[in-house]
């Protein structure tokens, strides 16, 4: 993640309100259109800060008054809510009546002497001992005096690479099923080459006292947070480069990785999935790609609970949002939401994954940026918002879900007949789709025709079914034509604006566009 944005508080308000409106799912559209897309079926109402799916309710659980750049939200063994900020302050909240909403706050540690800086990781050992990850250090925090306040900071690891590239340091920490402590460490460079530091760009693990520090896996640019599943599988996200060179043919994606011991995950050799000619036996691709510049931050695992079954045994990821100027200059602004990542085990011991937007922020009310997520003892999802130090609780309400389901009409089936076009026209369109024309990129670059793979754009297999119902007043052919010549006129939910090449309308001849429309509308449904 571009962590300077966790330290830089000087993003102009005008940019925050006007430029950062696009995000994974409904990127690049106006606030009015964005809210219109959510308002029909999402709860609570659009004037609230967090927009959630039907049956879910978002409410303020706590606010860390006095926090400066909040970075972590978690629950301790005492089932109380904790918040850490980058300045080393630790806040603890009390929910006396057990409704999931805190009544009181205390500053458990106020970082006397300012010893802690760039603190971005917090976890607990089973016996309740607190661990903190801050710039170059891993430390424990204890209450030695017995007065209920933390007062003894003890470093167990020092000298980790920190801030040699802006905002890259030792990041989130978590205990594994082996009783060891794991930490992700960012690279000392944006996109390579690596230095000779033995601890950069990797996941490390150690004993609880910091001894036997070793590399667990390599090949990460900036693994901001990590989480274990109850079965012991380790997951992390990784951020794409913030600066781009001429050697990069495209803006690389961010990614989610299933981290296995001894494996390499590509950085700085490649980003996202490796090219087809890569045959290194220990290099693993991500289990899914994410949009570029979403600012992947805190991650948590939802094993099970009151959420519907589709959310069980999957990941929730906070996407802080685009901060890199090179992305903003290209009109790309993604993230600022919570996504859910469903996991499917594979025969070779890893996973495939699909993601969808789970919760969105109403950016018409402010420049909100979720930075961390955790699951509470009540099975609700708790989201830490960076700009206001507010913790939101997202819970599932079966009564609301049932009421909404009863009030929702059953949609009529869409026509199932493929349109007919001259075979020669369709064949010409197929060539343009797969190879491009007039120096334009091939459509298949982003709109993959392999249903087993994720693309930067939505699959167009079977698009003839939905094309005529997406934009009022446009039939299927007019909709596909508009999508080619005006790519940002309508953004498919869960996809972002500005990724698609914007000049097809002026670069392609009318007859080439006709052929492309014909080919797209005759694509069958995925098998």
Image (cartoon, helix red, strand yellow):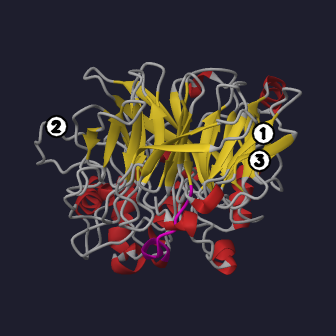
Q: Is residue 229 above or below residue 451?
A: above
Residue at the (65%, 56%) spot, across then down: 112
Q: Which residue is mark 1?
A: 93
**Label drawn at residue 40:** 3
**Position of residue 176 in the picture relative to residue 302 (left or right):** left
| Mark before the other along the chain sequence, 2 or 3 | 3
Task: Determine crowd level at label 1: few under 14, some 14-19, many 20+ residues with C-alpha closer than 10 A.
Answer: many
Marks 2/3: CA distance?
A: 47 Å
Disc 1 to disc 3, C-alpha distance: 35 Å
Of circles 2 and 3, the one toward us is: 2
Q: Helix, strand or loop at disc 1?
A: strand
Q: Position of residue 79 (x, y in %)?
A: 71, 27
Is residue 30 rendered to the left or right of residue 423? right
Query: What range of the chain is rendered magenta?
Result: 320-328
* Residue shown at the point (65%, 31%) measured from the top left: 76
Q: Position of residue 392 (x, y in %)?
A: 74, 44
Residue 527 lies in quadrant: top left
Looking at the picture, tell me which residue is in the foreground, 469 or 195.
195
Residue linked to disc 2 = 282
Q: Earlier in the sequence, mark 1 or mark 2?
A: 1
| Sequence-wise first label, 1 or 3 | 3
Residue at (77%, 54%) from the top-left corner?
49
Q: CA distance from mark 1 to mark 2?
A: 44 Å
């Amino acid at each position: 993640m571009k962590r300077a944005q966790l330290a830089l508080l000087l993003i102009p308000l005008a940019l925050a309100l006007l430029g950062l409106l696009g995000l994974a799912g409904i990127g690049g559209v106006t606030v009015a259109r964005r809210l219109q897309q959510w308002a029909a079926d999402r709860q609570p109402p659009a004037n609230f800060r967090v927009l959630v799916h039907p049956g879910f309710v978002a409410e303020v659980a706590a606010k860390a008054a006095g926090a400066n750049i909040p970075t972590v939200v978690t629950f301790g063994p005492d089932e109380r809510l904790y918040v850490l900020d980058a300045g080393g302050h630790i806040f603890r909240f009390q929910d006396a009546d057990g409704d999931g909403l805190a009544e009181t706050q205390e500053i458990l540690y106020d970082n006397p002497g300012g010893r802690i800086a760039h603190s971005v990781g917090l976890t607990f050992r089973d016996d309740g001992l607190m661990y903190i990850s801050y710039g170059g250090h891993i430390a424990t925090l204890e209450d030695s005096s017995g007065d209920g306040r933390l007062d003894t900071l003890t470093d167990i690891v020092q000298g980790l690479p920190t801030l040699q590239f802006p905002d890259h340091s030792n990041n989130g920490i978590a205990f594994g099923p082996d009783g060891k402590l794991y930490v992700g460490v960012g690279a000392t460079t944006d996109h390579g080459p690596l230095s000779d530091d033995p601890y950069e760009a990797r996941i490390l693990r150690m004993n609880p006292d910091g001894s036997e520090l070793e590399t667990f896996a390599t090949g990460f640019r900036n693994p901001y947070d990590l989480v274990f599943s109850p079965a012991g599988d380790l997951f992390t996200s990784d951020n794409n480069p913030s600066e781009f060179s001429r050697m990069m043919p495209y803006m690389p994606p961010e990614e989610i990785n299933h981290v296995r011991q001894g494996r390499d995950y590509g950085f700085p050799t490649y980003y996202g999935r490796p090219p087809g000619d890569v045959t290194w036996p220990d290099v693993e691709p991500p289990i899914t790609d994410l949009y570029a510049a979403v600012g992947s931050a805190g991650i948590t695992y939802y094993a099970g609970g009151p959420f519907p079954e589709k959310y069980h045994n999957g990941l929730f990821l906070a996407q802080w949002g685009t901060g890199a100027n090179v992305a903003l200059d290209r009109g790309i602004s993604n993230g600022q939401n919570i996504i859910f990542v469903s996991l499917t085990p594979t025969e070779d011991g890893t996973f495939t994954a699909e993601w969808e937007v789970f919760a969105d922020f109403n950016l018409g009310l402010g420049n909100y940026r979720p930075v961390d997520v955790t699951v509470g003892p009540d099975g609700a999802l708790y989201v830490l918002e960076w700009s206001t130090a507010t913790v939101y609780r997202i819970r599932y309400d079966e009564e609301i879900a049932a009421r909404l389901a009863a009030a929702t009409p059953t949609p009529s089936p869409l026509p199932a007949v493929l349109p007919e076009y001259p075979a020669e026209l369709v064949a010409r369109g197929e060539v343009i789709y797969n190879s491009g024309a007039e120096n334009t990129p091939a459509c298949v670059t982003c709109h993959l025709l392999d249903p087993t793979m994720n693309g930067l754009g939505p699959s167009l297999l079977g698009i003839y079914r939905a094309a005529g119902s997406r934009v009022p007043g446009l039939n299927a052919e007019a909709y596909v034509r508009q999508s080619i010549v005006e790519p940002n006129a309508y953004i498919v939910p869960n996809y972002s604006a500005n990724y698609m090449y914007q000049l097809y309308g002026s670069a392609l001849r009318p007859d080439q566009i006709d052929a492309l429309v014909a080919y797209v509308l005759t694509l069958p449904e995925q098998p």
